[in-house]
Amino acid sequence: MKVLVVGGAGYIGAHICKALAARGDTPVVFDNLSRGHTHAVRWGPLEQGDIRQEIDLRRAFEAHQPDAVMHFAAFAEVAEGEADPLGFWDNNVAGSLNLLRVMADAGWPPLVFSSTCAVYGVPERLPLTEDTLQRPINVYGRTKQAVERALADQAGAGGLRYAALRYFNAAGASPDGEIGEEHEPETHLIPNALKAAAGVGPAMKLFGTDYDTPDGTCIRDFIHVADLAQAHLAALDRLQAGAPSFTCNLGSGQGYSVREVLDAVERVTGRAVPFSVESRRPGDPARLFADISRAQQLLGFAPERSGLETMIADAWAFHRARWNLPAQ
Ligand code: UDP
């Protein structure tokens, strides 16, 4: 099967390309390389283009005639979205509408869409089920919610079948160390803690110790990127088998506090994590973790590598090699 992986040079997209190739599918990456990396495109051709340019997408579809589409191309940094709403709506929403128009002309290949738990906002009840009332509290979450609504409307009108996968906190690197998380600038917890532990970055800033949680720091649900990749393959297979559109959470189902993550980083690396306590980061809900029963039921989802120390160990192995640190 030939799969067009839109945004396939980024962190999550690249892991899905690797998983597709491992089972004999061909990932064709469409990416503008604004955030992704050419060195992460290793398992199929690269079509350089921008989702904001419909003509670029048409060119890729004509050249490759994909059997299915996976769509990861989006701006995803919450703070960036607050500063540049128009840029986020243009890239994330208008870009996705361009993709849908081209998919319509291509006879509606099935679509796996990369969504987020940010569509929920601050939950009233935990764990979060897919039916939780959606009240996104940032621009990023609202743009993803808007695309989900466009997908649902189009699927209702006929043609499109899709899976919208709402990720919680993606973490880790490929277990063989081949690819991992490389954001620039890096804003995420685990890579920043590893940088601080390794001494290749500044002391980590711990945003908020006064939340209504047992240790005062935020609680998040971390999911290994390799487990995410397996869920995407299962979602694709389900659509290929003719299933109707569906939406599901992808997390481990387990919440860990920021302090618990820092403790685990210290255990895995054998190094202290220097950090400073800062005030809360705007837009951070206190506690988020997923009910994953729908993913278990529909996709046979099992977050096998998503133990906290396993995820951190995989990320540490990847970064240690990149930073040329001596083996432990
Ligand atoms: N966090 C932190 N310092 C950092 C990065 C993140 O204290 O350098 C906290 C952040 O406030 C949040 C949690 O770690 O409570 C997870 O943040 P991240 O940016 O990794 O993912 P998000 O939950 O925003 O998707």
Image (tube, rainbow, N blue to C red):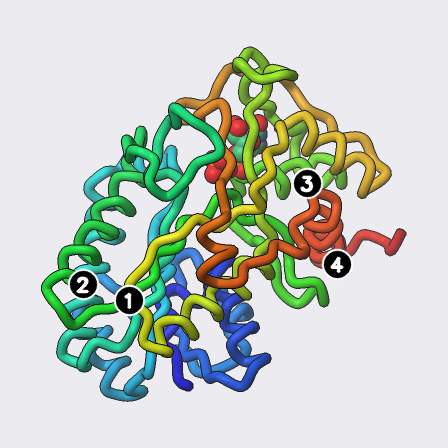
The mark nearer the N terminus, 3 or 2, is: 2
The mark nearer the N terminus, 4 or 3, is: 3
Q: Quadrant of residue 72?
A: bottom left
- According to the picture, the residue beneath numbered tag 4 turns out to be 321
Give the residue type at disc 2. Answer: Ala
- According to the picture, the residue beneath numbered tag 2 turns out to be 155
Query: Mark 1 packing: few (<14 Cα in 10 Å), some, or many (20+)?
Result: few
Q: Residue at x 48, y 34 (%)?
A: 127
Give the residue type at disc 4. Answer: Ala
Alpha carbon distance from label 3 to label 2? 43 Å
Looking at the image, is mark 3 or mark 1 nearer the viewer?
1
Task: Judge from the rendering whether residue 31 lies leftward or rightward of residue 224; answer left or right.
Answer: left
- According to the picture, the residue beneath numbered tag 1 turns out to be 244
The mark nearer the N terminus, 3 or 1, is: 3
Alpha carbon distance from label 3 to label 1? 43 Å
- Between 260 and 318, which is closer to the camera in this rendering? 260
Q: Secondary structure at mark 3?
A: helix
Give the residue type at disc 1. Answer: Pro
Looking at the image, is mark 4 or mark 1 nearer the viewer?
1
Disc number for residue 195 = 3
Q: Quadrant of residue 27?
A: bottom left
> Looking at mark 2, is its residue's CB closer than 8 Å to ligand 1?
no
- Between 184 and 161, which is closer to the camera in this rendering? 161
